[in-house]
Amino acid sequence: MLLEILTPDKKVFSEEIKLIQVPGTNGKFEVLKNHAPIVSTLENGKIKIIAMDGNKTFFNIQKGVIEVLKNKVIVLAEKIIE
């Protein structure tokens, strides 16, 4: 599935992935291929990404929104915390 992470300034990440774990407002949750459509708010926290080759990537975000639809995941983050 395709993941895009965007901030108001730029596109931070765009790649095919196996899994993403996000800090939802009501707790962490994961999205895998063929996940049901969803829109959810995100809290400050860590996003964990597992790439197709198994490599892990992490981003710390400052709040945001995630949308999952037809194996495309879009994360709109207020800010990436370095």
Image: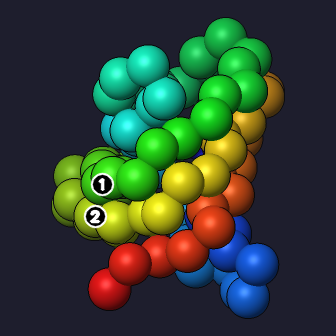
Quarter occupied by the C terminus: bottom left
Q: Nearer the viewer, mark 1 or mark 2?
A: 1
Looking at the picture, how far across and down is residue 81, in whole percent?
38, 78
Please determine whether, in this image, residue 17 is positioned above or below residue 29: below
| Disc 2 packing (10 Å; few <14; some 14–19; many ≥20) | few
Task: Tally the numbered discs.
Answer: 2
Q: Secondary structure at mark 2?
A: strand
Looking at the picture, how far across and down is residue 9, in whole percent?
73, 88
Please determine whether, in this image, residue 81 is positioned above or below residue 37: below
**Residue 68 visible in the snapshot:** no
Q: Nearer the viewer, residue 61 or 12?
A: 61
Identify the residue at horizontal 59%, vertical 17% (top origin): 35
Where is mark 2, residue-wise? 58
Q: Are marks 1 and 2 in contact (CB under 8 Å)?
A: yes
Choose the circle earlier in sequence order: 1 or 2: 1
- Which quadrant of the structure image shows residue 41? top right
Looking at the picture, how far across and down is residue 69, in whole percent?
78, 28
Where is mark 1, residue-wise? 46
Identify the residue at horizontal 74%, vertical 17% (top origin): 37
**For residue 24, side relative to residue 55 (left or right):** right
Q: Secondary structure at mark 1?
A: strand
Please determine whether, in this image, residue 35 is positioned above or below residue 8: above
Identify the residue at horizontal 33%, vertical 52% (top origin): 45
Distance CA(mark 1)–CA(mark 2): 7 Å
Looking at the picture, how far across and down is residue 68, in whole percent?
70, 31
The label on residue 34 is: none
| Disc 1 packing (10 Å; few <14; some 14–19; many ≥20) | some
Q: Amino acid at mark 1?
A: Lys
Identify the residue at horizontal 67%, vertical 11% (top origin): 36
**Residue 64 visible in the snapshot:** yes
Quarter occupied by the N terminus: top right
Q: Amino acid at mark 2?
A: Phe
